[in-house]
Image (cartoon, rainbow, N blue to C red):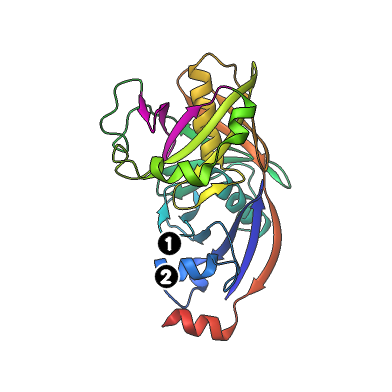
Amino acid sequence: MRFEKWEALGNDYVIIDAEDLSFPLTPAAVRRLCDRHTGPGADGILALSRTATPGFVARLQIFNPDGSEAELSGNGAREAILYLRRRGWTDRDQFSIETAAGEIRPTILGPTTCRVDMGRARLRSDAFPSGGPDGTGEVAGRRFQHVHVGNPQCAIRIADVAELDALDLPAIGPAIEHDPRFPQRTNVSFWCPVGEDAIRARIFERGVGETQSSGTGACGAAVAFALDGGRSPVSVALDGGELEVDVDESLHIDLTGWAVPVYAGALSDELVAELRG
């Protein structure tokens, strides 16, 4: 079974054509493929399949390294989008993809860059059922802004860059991710403003842990910044690089960034046989 490894701001995924699979993508199989010692290693799996839905190029499934399925990933989506274009699934600059979070519409801007219409963010969702109309609350002694961008985000403003950089995310992230207020668990973005239209953010991702970047995490932090009076488009500086997030008055989001291939490969017959069970 052939696959490609892609990365965006240090967030790496294994991309596979679902039609090539000869074994089920069980949670155990996903964990093995994402393992950096006994598999190709990745922050997740992107499984692409053909779709009969008119106007859609492909269906995208996203799996976290713990084996769970994610509704959406901003970095993963861009990797899948540019893979589809490079591999000839479409020659159009604008098209639609099906995800568990619904339709996403990318615009190809260059060989390694695209803009993704992420839809409209929501401040109330069943991922934070006890939340009020403004989506704010307190968790682990910190005020947060709930933002649903296809998946749940908990955006926490930090006073300054020094405090942000000093946070021990592996120590504080799990308790927030698994807090009972969030029945679907949550992604967590710690952020602080660094300009009128710029923020610095660090991400603790649901089912992943601390990560160098997250497209949806950047979106959640950018929405929280905009709600606090920040200007849009927002430049979001992550550990792995920068993303641009445009948030309009209705909280509609466009995410712009890059993604590149790292290598192509094939699983060994022995590993495929093992994954078949």
Give the residues drawn in magenta, as a range. 135-159
Main SS of residues in magenta: strand
- In the rendered view, tell whether residue 216 sits above or below residue 54: above
Element at badge 2?
A: helix
Query: Can residue 122 be seen by looking at this rendering?
Result: yes
| Screen quadrant of the C terminus | bottom left
In percent of the image, x 57 and y 76: which residue is there?
1
Name the disc covering residue 67, or none.
1
- Residue 37, position as x, y percentages in the image: 60, 71
The residues tagged by marks 2 and 1 sit, at their Cα atoms, a distance apart of: 6 Å
State the image quarter where residue 175 is shown.
top left
Front residue of 268 and 166: 166
Residue 151 shown in magenta: yes
Residue 157 in picture, x, y percent from top left: 51, 25
Q: Say which residue label 2 marks.
A: 28
Label 1 packing within 10 angstroms: few (<14), some (14-19), many (20+): many
Q: Residue at x 52, y 19 (%)?
A: 226
Please name the residue shown 40% across and 57% down the image. 68
> The disc labelled 1 sits on which kind of residue?
Gly
- Relative height, residue 45 to residue 145 (above, below): below
The amino acid beneath tag 2 is Ala
Query: Relative to 52, is 2 above or below?
Result: below
Circles 2 and 1, Cβ within 8 Å, touching? The answer is yes
* Outermost residue toward the top in this view: 229
Q: Can residue 235 be seen in this view?
A: no
In the rendered view, would you say 58 is above or below 132?
below
Does 122 sit left or right of 161 as displayed? left
Query: Where residue 48 sits in the image (x, y, percent)?
Result: 51, 60
The disc, 2 or 1, on the residue closer to the chain's N-terminal end is 2
Which residue is painted at 51% across and 43% down in the image? 204
